[in-house]
């Protein structure tokens, strides 16, 4: 199945999906040294986003969250790709400075969890395929 | 979004990797918020300077970008300490070393080492109708509302990107038609100095991130408006306010909603921010004090208690001799200094913004009173 979206950060990468139905605040909800989700209220607590296709509705919280994505990248603990329903400034800026391919305007409810997702993000065409 | 050939070339890396990333940030934000194009800016003000707020993540980022150069006048928000007198403040050496690395990264990019939330008291006063990219929330609301300049509430990286390219995406408050209020707050009581801060905070909690118009205030000084704006930007995320007969812009949307403010709401907020009564320290300067504000404190002071006043270096340099129990710190403020590590349990302030962040960010108790009461 192929779902089209909008390119936020270009790139093409294949990675296993991890899906959060809740918005994510990178400052506070994710450990920048391990890439483990620490948010008490997220059912994914304790799971790793390292090298995964991280799928969630949108970002929230402090703008420092952009820098946390950057620190994850420098620690080799960043997600391989990001898919949002609606990109906002914190996650978009974080993905840009960290070179994490990202698309948005995707209906995420139809994406299966723990499945290999091809994310292709270019100016002309942006989609995920599984 | 439309890009010129030159902008397209920067995006494709013609001026190096960092400027390409900066351009991608501006273009992506422009796409997300439906900007038509990029517009030139006259100045940038970059938040996310304190090591307390951005941590190792932000430090690493700024050091990696330190080779690029800004192309417009750029200033920093307050740092986590007075860059010269940090030992006196009780700042640890570990914190100070990391903080100084952040400042070094920013100054090597050409950002002026003038760390203030009130650049308009320190020689940078944007003219009416000009476009700027500022990020400190109280400075953004001051510039939009009182000076009539035009800026969105930028984040640290987007303000830095704007500084490196001299441009910002043309959306939000850069577009004249968007500078209208859908909320009208009516006031039928007189306001003390402290009430301006309380009213701003209260309106912020209702308006969230919407432009807010206010009717019923017959006169206000710029200092009172500064306190009002800082409160509104901290209580919610108000980017601009309009006061009938006072601010340069006052335009209501046709379908505006009217909200009458009850005086008791202000007293409720004062109570909420009064959780202790024996302050370890009395603090002024949130936002940073102007020269005139500090003179007023010096002239009226009766208390022997320890007072800290935060201001910009530019203002400190002009000050006359000050009483012994007053310490003037610059480059920093009580919101972004690591007060929780400085053995301060109760802080007295005349600012709802300072009280809000002391309670919510630093987890310390606050006493909120008027300046006159605190120094009597």
Image (cartoon, rainbow, N blue to C red):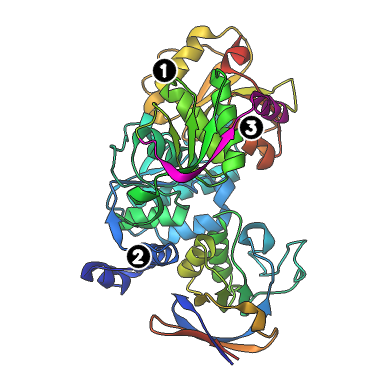
Identify the residue under disc 2. B23
| Outermost residue toward the front in this view | B254
Circle 2 Cα neighbour tier, 10 Å, few/some/many (<14 / 14–19 / ≥20): many
Compare marks 3 and 1 and give the one earlier in the sequence.
Answer: 1
Q: Residue at x 66, y 34 (%)?
A: B342
Residue B14 left/right relative to B194: left
Compare marks 2 and 1 and give the one earlier in the sequence.
Answer: 2
Give me the C-alpha separation between circle 3 and circle 1.
23 Å
Identify the residue under disc 1. B292
Identify the residue under disc 3. B355
Residue B319 horizontal/vertical position (percent): 40, 18
Tell if the residue under mark 3 belongs to the same chain as the one under mark 1: yes
Q: Residue at x 49, y 32 (%)?
A: B214
Using the image, name the chain to which the residue with label 1 belongs: B
Using the image, name the chain to which the residue with label 3 belongs: B
Circle 1 Cα neighbour tier, 10 Å, few/some/many (<14 / 14–19 / ≥20): few
Residue B141 to residue A51: above or below: above
**Secondary structure under badge 1?**
helix
Residue B80 horizontal/vertical position (percent): 54, 40
Q: Which residues are magenta?
A: B249-272
Residue B300 horizontal/vertical position (percent): 52, 8
**Res B175 visible:** yes
């Amino acid at each position: 199945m192929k779902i089209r979206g909008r390119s936020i950060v270009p790139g093409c990468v294949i990675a296993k999906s991890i899906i959060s139905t809740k918005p994510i605040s990178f400052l506070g909800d994710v450990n920048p040294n391990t890439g483990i989700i620490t948010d008490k209220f997220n059912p994914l607590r304790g799971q790793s986003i390292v090298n995964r296709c991280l799928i969630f509705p949108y970002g929230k919280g402090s703008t420092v969250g952009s820098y946390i994505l950057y620190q994850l990248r420098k620690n080799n603990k960043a997600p391989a790709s990001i898919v949002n329903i609606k990109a906002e400034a914190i996650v978009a800026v974080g993905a840009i400075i960290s070179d994490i391919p990202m698309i948005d305007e995707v209906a995420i409810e139809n994406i299966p969890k723990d499945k290999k997702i091809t994310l292709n993000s270019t100016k002309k065409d942006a989609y995920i395929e599984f | 979004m439309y890009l010129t050939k030159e902008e397209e070339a920067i995006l494709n890396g013609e001026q190096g990797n960092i400027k390409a990333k900066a351009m991608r940030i501006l273009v992506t934000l422009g796409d997300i918020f439906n900007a038509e194009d990029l517009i030139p800016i006259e100045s940038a003000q970059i938040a996310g300077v304190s090591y307390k707020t951005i941590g190792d993540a932000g430090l690493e980022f700024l050091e990696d970008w330190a080779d690029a150069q800004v192309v417009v006048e750029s200033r920093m928000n307050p740092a986590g300490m007075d860059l010269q007198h940090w030992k006196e403040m009780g700042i640890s050496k570990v914190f100070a070393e990391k903080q100084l690395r952040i400042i070094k990264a920013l100054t090597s990019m050409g950002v002026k080492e003038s760390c203030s939330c009130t650049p308009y008291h320190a020689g940078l006063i944007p003219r009416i109708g000009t476009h700027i990219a500022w990020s400190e929330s109280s400075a953004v609301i001051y510039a939009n509302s009182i000076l009539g300049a035009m800026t969105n509430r930028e984040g640290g990286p987007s303000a830095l990107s704007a500084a490196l390219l001299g441009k910002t995406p043309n959306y939000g408050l850069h577009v004249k038609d968007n500078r209208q209020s859908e909320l009208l707050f009516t006031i039928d009581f007189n306001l003390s100095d402290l009430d301006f801060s309380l009213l701003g905070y209260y309106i912020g909690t209702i308006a969230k991130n919407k432009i807010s118009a206010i009717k019923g205030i017959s006169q206000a000084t710029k200092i009172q408006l500064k306190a009002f704006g800082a409160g509104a930007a901290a209580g919610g995320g108000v980017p601009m306010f309009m006061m009938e007969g006072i601010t340069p812009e006052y335009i209501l949307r046709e379908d505006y909603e009217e909200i009458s403010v009850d005086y008791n709401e202000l007293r409720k907020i004062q109570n909420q921010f009064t959780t202790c009564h024996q302050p370890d320290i009395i603090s002024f300067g949130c936002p940073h004090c102007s020269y005139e504000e500090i003179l007023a404190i010096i002239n009226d002071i009766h208390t022997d208690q320890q007072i800290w006043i935060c201001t910009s270096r530019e203002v400190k340099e002009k000050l006359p001799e000050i009483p012994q129990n007053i310490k003037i710190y610059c480059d920093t403020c009580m919101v972004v200094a690591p007060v929780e590590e400085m053995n301060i349990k109760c802080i007295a302030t005349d600012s709802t913004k300072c009280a809000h962040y002391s309670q919510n960010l630093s987890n310390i108790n606050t006493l909120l009173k008027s300046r006159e009461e605190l120094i009597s």
